[in-house]
Image (tube, rainbow, N blue to C red):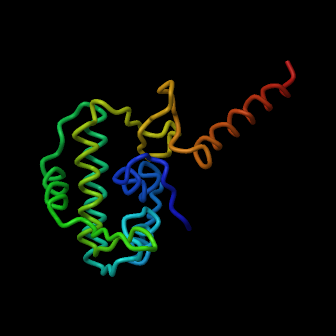
Amino acid sequence: MSFVFVSGNLALDFAGTLKWRRSEPEELLATSADLGRWAVEAGVTNEAPAIDAADLRRLRTLREAVYRLVIHGVNGLPWPDGDLGVVNEEAAGAPPGVRLTPGGLVRTGDAGALAAAVARSAAELLGELSELRVRECALAECTRLFIDRSRGGNRQWCGMEECGNRVKVANYRSRKSAATVPR
């Protein structure tokens, strides 16, 4: 399993690690190793930080707080106080360390630094929410959030590879079967 980064924001991509929330949720962060791999693939750290079971629970709590805050914000609802507290507390932590070496940029950090990076990304996004086109994927089962940066502002799906392709194939099959029905 590999992660996808189609949301246009670190915190939204992190929220997307729980898929299909309204139907049969698929947990992409099932283990501490998964979370460490996500940190590397997301570019937060160069090497997977040591993450224990408590860290995994803590970061999943942050993920759900981010998701609820964005959903509330997009729908014009007040932000839940508890979720604001979670994001603000994690955002106050030390972010990943950055060091320039002859070989390039090296990012290091532990689970707390990962939480701080995600929470800061969420805080910045939520602080600018009224200026951004944040959307939820138009595929009914998908709950992934993304920033619509398309020229026309009409992006519908989180990504073409998974959701957009599903919709296009379903539409094609529907047209094909309608064309073969005798009248």
Location of residue 34 (image quadrant): bottom left
Front residue of 134/106: it is: 106
Instruction: Name which residue lies at 49% across and 49% down.
Output: 6
User: Seen in the image, is 19 located left or right of residue 100?
Assistant: right
Give the x, y percent position of residue 161. 62, 48
Instruction: Name which residue lies at 32% across and 71% down.
Output: 99
User: Seen in the image, is 49 located left or right of residue 104?
Assistant: left
Location of residue 45 (image quadrant): bottom left
User: Seen in the image, is 96 located left or right of residue 87?
Assistant: right
Give the x, y percent position of residue 106. 38, 71
Q: Up-down: is 173 above or below 108?
A: above
Location of residue 85 (image quadrant): bottom left
Front residue of 91/142: it is: 91
Residue at the extreme top of the image, as rendered: 183
Question: In which quadrant of the rendered image does the C terminus lie?
Answer: top right
Instruction: Name which residue lies at 38% across and 57% down.
Output: 14
Question: In which quadrant of the rendered image does the N terminus lie?
Answer: bottom right
